[in-house]
Image (tube, grey):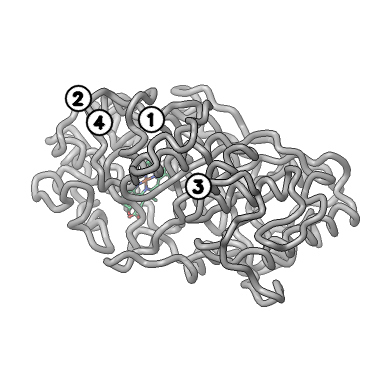
Amino acid sequence: MELPEFPFDSDSQLSRRQFVRAAVAAGGTAALSACLDTEDRESLDAPTGVSDPGTLPDRQHAWNDVLPVDSDGNVSRASHHVFLSLSLTGEPDSAGREQVETTLKTLERALEWGPDGVLFTLGYTPAYFDRFDGSLPDSVDLPDPEPITAITAESQVEIDDSDAMLHLASDDPAVVLAVEEALFGETDSLNGTAIDEGLTPVFERTSRRTGFVGAGLPADRQTGLDGIPEGEPVPEEAPFFMGFRSGFRESQATEDRVTIESGAFAGGSTQHFESMELDLEIWFDDNDHEQRVARMFSPEHAREESVGAVGEKLETETGAPAVTEEIHEHAREEGAVGHAQKLARARDDGQPVLLRRDVNTTDGDAAGLHFLSLQREMTEFTRVREAMLGEEFHQHGLGPRQPNGILQYIRLRRWGSYLLPPRSLRSLPQPSP
Ligand code: HEM
């Protein structure tokens, strides 16, 4: 991606927001210097981390305690994200293990664990574990990633078969860039802390995906993007491209619910990560707000006007569980079912099983979403994802190209699954540690 020359409009807050998002998407030292507003890559001024990384939570995915809650009480997401797919450069031996662990501990000393500093997870694919003689214990449910057939019939999907994924998140775009440069670039210092070769002796980056989330960010980026119609339809207050808030407290699993409870990897989790492009031309051009609410939430939400422009009327819950019984009636009589309505039926004993941490993306200059979810077992994810396909509504004439939730507007591109080991086992784990 071409990086706009900096500063292209230094007086404008909007331009600055657009600029930093483009810088994260571009990556590299030039983007970092531009974000820091200086050539001096040492000038990152972020809160420093802990002197003893052993004091950090054993769960790599323990982010909620340090993320702020919004005025309704929902956990917010960090604004800027980089997802790096990594392949091993050699065998996963003890020297490599030590290199990774030393580097990650240095990162934890250099930057505060939180959105002002950095949050990160390092996860491993089934392909990574395949090279070992032993297999993962039964307490870890991580089958080979195979997209559900009904999805591959609709889209061309690439499987993530690299070894690992590093997810970096921060509210400060310069931080994610600086961390990436320190781990894989030429810099030898991060936020004033010396860092040696970083992860380069062990891993190479095989792909780089980026994301952002928060009110105003999608609206800033909607002009001239593939998949978005003219006329700037994404509301300024919307945190996501499709125009609604997401991640209400009552529709998210807790971190406890997604944590592996027993065995060698207790304290870990499994992560699903899929990338999709969005067809927002038909989403915005063919539907009015009421129809969009019906497809995203439910026809009843649309009738009752219970959502508001971007979901501001919903405080910590969508109200979707209250309309699950009527779903077949909605399909038959109103010719639509809602995404949230369908998915609320896949709860376990009334409780959500996925902790979603999805973000918008403009990778490839197309409007998209990187959908990330954590769950205790990958099989739970598959069950919920199948519920999203809503095949039972085909009998009412709602195929994947009809108002069967939001299926019609999504093109799946990549699909992967990972084990997020507990922090103590995050560096080149063996299947039976
Ligand atoms: C473009 C893609 C997507 C968009 C824009 C989207 C948006 C939303 C929105 C607005 C809600 C209701 C508000 C809330 O989050 O509480 C929701 C709920 C939900 N979505 Fe999605 N979603 C997308 C894809 C997915 C995918 C791929 C899955 C995977 C299975 C998924 C699973 C869920 C679940 C489990 C819920 C909560 C249901 C409950 O209340 O129990 N979503 N989504």
Q: Nearer the viewer, mark 4 or mark 3?
A: 4
In three-dimensional space, the C-alpha distance between marks 2 and 4, rounded to whole angstroms, equals 15 Å
SS label for mark 2: loop
Most extreme residue toward the left is: 304
Is residue 111 shown left or right of residue 311? right
SS label for mark 4: loop
Residue 206 vs 173, above or below: the answer is above
Q: Nearer the viewer, mark 2 or mark 4?
A: 4
First of labels 3, 1 by sequence position: 1
Where on the picture, by quarter, is residue 406?
top left
The mark total stands at: 4
Q: Would you call the spot at circle 2 few (<14 residues within 10 Å), some (14-19), or many (20 or more)?
A: few
Q: Nearer the viewer, mark 1 or mark 4?
A: 4
First of labels 2, 3 by sequence position: 2
Residue 25 vs 230, above or below: the answer is below
Q: Which residue is mark 1?
A: 278
Q: Which residue is mark 2?
A: 286
Specify the amino acid type for callout 1.
Leu
Q: Which residue is mark 3?
A: 372
Q: Which mark is residue 232?
A: 4
SS label for mark 1: strand
Specify the amino acid type for callout 4.
Glu
Label 1 beta carbon within 8 A of ligand 1: yes
How far across and down, in percent of the image, does residue 211 sit?
48, 42
